[in-house]
Amino acid sequence: MSEFVYRNKEELLYSQRVAQLSKALWRVIEKDWQCWIKPYDLNINEHHILTITYYMKGASVSDVAKYGSMHVSTAFNFSKKLEERGYLTFSKRDDDKRNTYIEITPAGKALIDEANRHYFDTPHAILEGSLKIKELYGRFPEFLEVTAIVRNIYGNEFIEMLEQSFQNLSHTLDTIDDVKHSELMKEA
């Protein structure tokens, strides 16, 4: 009997620890994210949808919902608002009439690129809170265990898509940096 009680206690404490720490992190992340995108008249869902469509290149509404960790109706409704503002387009594919696909427009890409260029114009408590770890260990936390948990819940495809989107973001930032460097060289 005591083993059963202990196991349940351990599981309850673990679940509560994950919930409380996640909630605390999300609160800071949400505040940082809202502050960063406020000048672009976007909310978090809209920005997230734009970045997903930017880096996935031809995502379905279902893909956006899945990788954005949101309900399909949320993904669709916010995508429609972004379409009205000229940042996204909707389409059907000849080989797949059941799904609706979303493409980011040049205006949407320009908006995301602009936001990325100005990322450091606003404070980021989550980044500041991580810099001491980077100073101490020479790298940011990798969240290997958290990634493993998410992989166990959502599957390999979810993690692979996230990793691919981070690679695409890195490539985009390198391109922006190359353009900025070329512009500085022209001015010199």
Image (cartoon, helix red, strand yellow):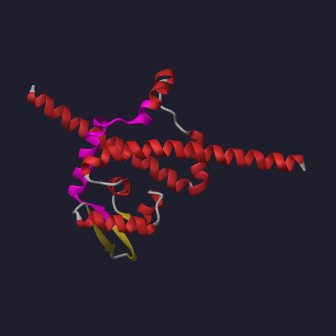
Q: Residue at x 9, y 29 (%)?
A: 187
* Residue 106 belongs to magenta span: yes
Which residue is the extreme one toward the top?
136
Residue 70 x, y percent position in the rendering: 46, 61
Q: Quadrant of residue 95?
A: bottom left
| 176 relative to 12 in the view: left or right | left
Q: Residue at x 26, y 40 (%)?
A: 117
Q: Main secondary structure of the magenta part?
A: helix
Residue 182, horizontal then vertical, whole percent: 16, 33
Residue 137's place in the image compared with 151, above or below, is above
Query: Closer to the camera, 162 or 35?
Result: 35
Give the extent of the magenta segment. Answer: 102-128
Instruction: Name the residue located 44 percent from the left edge and 68 percent from the top edge.
Output: 72
Q: Is residue 101 left or right of residue 11?
A: left
Residue 121 or 175: which is nearer the viewer? 121
As drawn, the residue found furthest toward the right would be 1
Image position, residue 177 (x, y; %): 25, 36
Identity of the residue drawn at 41% across and 61% down: 64
Coordinates of residue 125 in the picture (x, y in percent): 42, 35
Front one among 149 and 124:
124
Q: Quadrant of the C terminus?
A: top left
